[in-house]
Image (spheres, grey):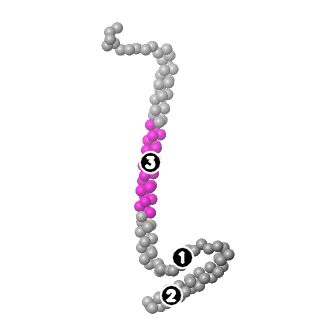
């Protein structure tokens, strides 16, 4: 044998070797298929996130436009202890009635 000759190795059971080689090839193909599925899922995820952000921007713009048309009130959400809840409800109700009367007065002026 010369130095340039090819190195050969004997295979004792060629059928088992082929079977294992085909099994390995099958596993590689399955892994590639899973990888392609993951890539598709990632692309869908990116598209959904982009769509979500676009819809969120649109909603924020609509809310901003809506706030221009909603009358301003002096009411704020207050968190008070439960013992003062009844007193708070009546005072909030009075404020609402006052604001309603103011709005009705402004509407009357517009007519």
Looking at the picture, does residue 81 appear above or below residue 93? above
Marks 1 and 2, how far apart in space?
A: 18 Å
Q: Is the magenta stretch mostly helix, strand or loop?
A: helix
Residue 28 position within the rendered picture, expressed as x and y whole percent measured from the top left: 46, 32
- Say if the magenta span includes residue 80: no
> Circles 3 and 2: CB distance less than 8 Å?
no
Q: Earlier in the sequence, mark 1 or mark 2?
A: 1
Residue at 44% x, 74% y is: 66
Q: Is 71 in front, or is 79?
A: 79
Q: Quadrant of residue 56?
A: bottom left
Read off the residue under disc 3.
Answer: 42
Q: Is 35 in front, or is 103?
A: 103
Looking at the picture, does residue 43 appear above or below residue 64? above
Quick one: quadrant of the C terminus? Answer: bottom left
- The tag on residue 76 is 1
Which structural element holds mark 1? loop
Quick one: quadrant of the N terminus? Answer: top left
How crowded pointer 3 is (Cα within 10 Å; few <14, some 14-19, many 20+) is rated as few
Q: Left or right: where does residue 106 sit relative to residue 88? A: left
Marks 3 and 1, how far apart in space?
A: 43 Å
Q: Earlier in the sequence, mark 3 or mark 1?
A: 3
Tell me where the magenta segment starts and ends, as one range. 32-56
Residue 18 position within the rendered picture, expressed as x and y whole percent measured from the top left: 47, 22
Read off the residue under disc 2.
Answer: 102
């Amino acid at each position: 044998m010369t130095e340039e000759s090819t190195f050969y190795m004997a295979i004792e059971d060629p059928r088992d070797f082929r079977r294992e080689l085909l099994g390995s090839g099958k596993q590689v193909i399955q892994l590639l298929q899973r990888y392609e599925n993951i890539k598709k899922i990632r692309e869908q995820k990116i598209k959904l996130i982009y769509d979500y952000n676009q819809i969120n921007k649109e909603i924020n713009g609509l809310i901003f436009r809506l706030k221009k048309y909603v009358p301003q009130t002096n009411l704020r959400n207050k968190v008070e202890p439960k013992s003062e809840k009844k007193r708070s409800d009546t005072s909030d109700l009075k404020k609402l009635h006052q604001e309603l009367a103011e709005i009705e007065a402004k509407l009357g002026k517009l007519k």
